[in-house]
Image (cartoon, rainbow, N blue to C red):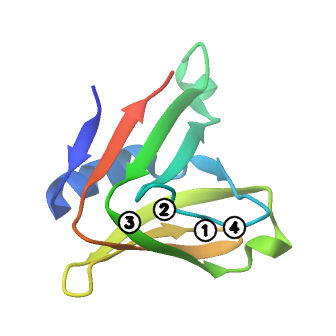
Amino acid sequence: MPLIAHGKVMLSFIADILHDLSFDVPADGFRATEGRFRLRLVDKHSHFRDEPAAMVFDLTVHDVVSVEAEGRPEDDPGEDLFNDFEFDGKRQVLALKCSLAIKRIRCSVRRLHVELEQVT
């Protein structure tokens, strides 16, 4: 069952789960398809916590109008790390703050609706 955020409290909870998890940066950039933006995040350090396999999460942002990345993903199209969310309710922009080649992934949304589901 996914965790769903429609407000900043649950969004902060989801950010705590995803902090420092890695995701692949696509060479052709980020896109929203069918009004959704998806990232698969992996906890590659879960073996340090005696987890038998890496934990994998699917993050979906719904009601997305557009997506833009700030930074230089073309310089490092491999992997990046998630840090936090930043939501501007007046402008309806959800930013995923990252830490390597990408500074932020900005999703313009109609409303805040984020889902997180653990895959493994």
Name the quadrant of the N terminus.
top left
Q: Is residue 4 above or below residue 30?
A: above
Q: Is residue 10 above or below residue 76?
A: above
Residue 29 — which label? 4
Q: Position of residue 50 (x, y in %)?
A: 55, 17
Element type at mark 4: loop
The reply to whether discs 3 and 4 touch (Cβ–Cβ < 8 Å) is no
Mark 3–mark 4 distance (CA, rounded to whole Å):
16 Å
Q: Where is residue 104 in the image (x, y as percent from the top left)?
A: 53, 75
User: What residue is shown with label 3?
Assistant: 64
Dot placed on the residue nearer the N-terminal end, 1 or 3: 3
Q: Kindly identify the amino acid type of the residue bearing the numbered disc 3.
A: Val
User: What residue is shown with label 1?
Assistant: 99
Q: Which of marks 1 and 3 is in front?
A: 3
Q: Kindly identify the amino acid type of the residue bearing the numbered disc 4.
A: Gly
Mark 2–mark 1 distance (CA, rounded to whole Å):
7 Å
Element type at mark 3: strand
Q: In this view, does 51 lie above or below 118?
A: above
Dot placed on the residue nearer the N-terminal end, 2 or 1: 2
Identify the residue at image location x=56%, y=42%.
40
Dot placed on the residue nearer the N-terminal end, 4 or 1: 4
Q: Which of 34 and 80 is in front in this view?
A: 34
User: What residue is shown with label 2?
Assistant: 83
Q: Is residue 106 visible?
A: no
- Disc 3 crowd rating (10 Å Cα; few below 14, some 14-19, many 20+) is many
Q: Where is residue 76 in the image (x, y as percent from the top left)?
A: 82, 67
Q: Kindly identify the amino acid type of the residue bearing the numbered disc 2.
A: Asn
The reply to whether discs 2 and 1 touch (Cβ–Cβ < 8 Å) is yes
Element type at mark 2: strand
Dot placed on the residue nearer the N-terminal end, 3 or 2: 3
